[in-house]
Structure formats: structure tokens, C-alpha cells
Image (cartoon, rainbow, N blue to C red):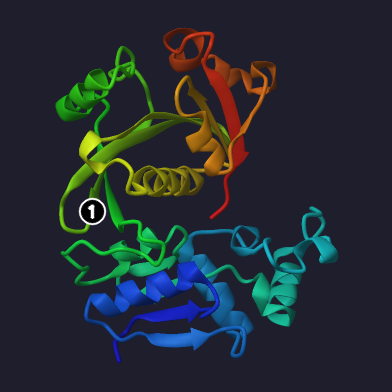
């Protein structure tokens, strides 16, 4: 038994994927099926604090009594929300992994890789056949990023000026599969420079990259995502984005060079909320 633990729901595909990745790294974690054996109050509070998240951030909405209990109301205190999570453990989002390297709500499942003392170094696939991915920060003026975007016909004129964050994506085996970034304005963030390399297309890589990017934006304070595209509307819609009039976007998003100058007027604006 290792010093890694997981709050696990065996009925959840994300949770099963995370458990499989931990085992593939050579560790046998302490598996806590929290629906049957929920953590105590102090243990749950400590996990949430170590994740650097709010209690509300850890609430699961889908498939839970969240709406029935009216937990979207702002009057609930943290202690009251924890009361509800202990009374209804399904409200605890999953999987939560604790290791010597930290604690994380591993949504998307790829986030578990950074918690593993000896992460797998060979390519692996999740239950749906998509590859596991890792991300690494890159500078906006990174030469390889600029070349890749230019080859794809994506704008690069503002890369040296933007305060955005950019990432390079690779498989566990080291295959470089693409880039992505975001600019944040308060709780709103603009997805930009999302590019899957031609050799990595049609493998579910784009969706995995976007999920990791949105989680990084969430951890950075973003709560709603915006995107402008002329060619990838269906891709964003599959990831939960919905087209919306430009007048509905925050002024700070419309003021970015991407929205104001670099993207054509024909580009479709889409948005979605962000939660782990």
C-alpha cells in the first residue's frame, strides 16, 4: 500500500481512469469508496483546504440533490454546505487524490499525473480511447508556439504583448500534440491559440487539451469561458459551449486584441461556465 489515497466512486468513469493511472505508476493507493464510507468533517475540511479550493467549488451538481436542496443559493455557509456533503456524500465531487506531492480534485483525470511520484512514461489511453495528456507552461513568445500557430493560420501578432497563459501538450510517452492558451479578465477567460498538431488529430486530443486548459483557468480564478472561431464551432459545442451574441460578452473580453482586431467579424462567439 502506498501513501496515495483516492476518494473513489467505482460508478464514475473519471474516477476509474484516475485509479487506473495511479496503479499504472506502480502504486497501490488506499481506495476510499466515499459513498459508503464518507470522510469525517475535519478530514473533509482538511482535504478542501489542501486543494486550495472553496467548499462550494468541491460540490458536485450533476446527478446529485444539489438543485433539490437549493444549494445554489448564496446564504449557505461553508459549514452548512459541509453538513449537506456529509449527509449526502454524492455531493462531494470526485475523485480527490492525496499524495506526498499534494491534493487535487482530479477533473479532468489527467490532473492526477502531477501527483504521482513516478508517473507513467509510456502512452496510455482512458476508457473512452482518448490519450492521457500532460501540459507544460510556455512563454507567449516561444518560437515553436509561434511557428505552429502561423503554420495553422492562427493569429500571433499579440503574443508578445498579452498577459495570457500558454501551454504545450504532450502524451505520457512524450509525443507533442499541440498548444493552447487563455487570457483572463476577472472571472471571464478567452480561449485562444488552441491548436492540435496535424499528426495528433482525430484521436480525441483536442477535447483533452481543452479540458485541461479550462481547469487551469478555473484554478486561476476563471469561472466562465469564451471562444471565437470560424471553423471549430461544432468542436466547442461538443465541449459544452453555446453560441451567443457578441453583445452578451463582458467588455473586457471584447476589448482583447483577439476579439477587437485579430478575429474576423464572421467569427462565432461561444461561451460556457467552468467547473471542475
Q: Quarter holding the N terminus?
A: bottom left
**Rendering coords of residue 19 (x, y %):** 38, 76
Q: Is residue 119 visible?
A: yes
Q: Is residue 271 above or below residue 122?
A: above
Query: Residue visible at 22% across and 20% down?
Result: 151
Q: Is residue 144 above or below residue 153?
A: below
Residue occupied by mark 1:
171
**Rendering coords of residue 267 (x, y %):** 52, 16
Query: Residue visible at 44% across and 64% down?
Result: 106
Q: Is residue 95 above or below residue 265?
A: below
- The answer to which of 261 and 84 lies nearer the viewer is 261
Q: Would you say 125 lies left or right of 261 here?
A: left
Total numbered labels placed on residues in the image: 1
Q: Would you say 130 lies left or right of 243 here?
A: left
Query: Residue visible at 25% across and 64% down?
Result: 124
> Callout 1 environment at 10 Å: few (<14), some (14 to 19), or many (20+)?
many
**Rendering coords of residue 109 (x, y %):** 41, 62
Q: Is residue 122 above or below residue 206?
A: below
Q: Is residue 222 visible?
A: no
- The answer to which of 172 and 219 lies nearer the viewer is 172
Q: Residue furthest front?
A: 202
**Rendering coords of residue 224 (x, y %):** 59, 38
Determine whether the residue tagged by mark 1 lies in a helix, strand or loop. Answer: strand
Query: Residue visible at 75% across and 74% down?
Result: 84
Amino acid at each position: 500500500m502506498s501513501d496515495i489515497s483516492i476518494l473513489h466512486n467505482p460508478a464514475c468513469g473519471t474516477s476509474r481512469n484516475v485509479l487506473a493511472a495511479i496503479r499504472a505508476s506502480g502504486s497501490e493507493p488506499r481506495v476510499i469508496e466515499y459513498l459508503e464510507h464518507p470522510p469525517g468533517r475535519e478530514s473533509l475540511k482538511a482535504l478542501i483546504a489542501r486543494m486550495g479550493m472553496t467548499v462550494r467549488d468541491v460540490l458536485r451538481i450533476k446527478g446529485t440533490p444539489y438543485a433539490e436542496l437549493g444549494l445554489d443559493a448564496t446564504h449557505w455557509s461553508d459549514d452548512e454546505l459541509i453538513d449537506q456533503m456529509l449527509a449526502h456524500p454524492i455531493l462531494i465531487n470526485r475523485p480527490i487524490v492525496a499524495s506526498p506531492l499534494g491534493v487535487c480534485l482530479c477533473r479532468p483525470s489527467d490532473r492526477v499525473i502531477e501527483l504521482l511520484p513516478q508517473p507513467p512514461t509510456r502512452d496510455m489511453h482512458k476508457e473512452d480511447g482518448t490519450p492521457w495528456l500532460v501540459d507544460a507552461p510556455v512563454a507567449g513568445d516561444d518560437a515553436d508556439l509561434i511557428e505552429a500557430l502561423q503554420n495553422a493560420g492562427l493569429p500571433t501578432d499579440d503574443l508578445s504583448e498579452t498577459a495570457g497563459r500558454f501551454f504545450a501538450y504532450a502524451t505520457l510517452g512524450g509525443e507533442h500534440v499541440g498548444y493552447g492558451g487563455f487570457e483572463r479578465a476577472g472571472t471571464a477567460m478567452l480561449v485562444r491559440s488552441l491548436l492540435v498538431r496535424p499528426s495528433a488529430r482525430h484521436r480525441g486530443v483536442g477535447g483533452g487539451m481543452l479540458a485541461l486548459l479550462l481547469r487551469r483557468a478555473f484554478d486561476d480564478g476563471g469561472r466562465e469561458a469564451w471562444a471565437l472561431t470560424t471553423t471549430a464551432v461544432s468542436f466547442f459545442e461538443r465541449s459544452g459551449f453555446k453560441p451567443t451574441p457578441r453583445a452578451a460578452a463582458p467588455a473586457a473580453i471584447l476589448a482583447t486584441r483577439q476579439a477587437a482586431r485579430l478575429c474576423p467579424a464572421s467569427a462565432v462567439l461561444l461561451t460556457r461556465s467552468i467547473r471542475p
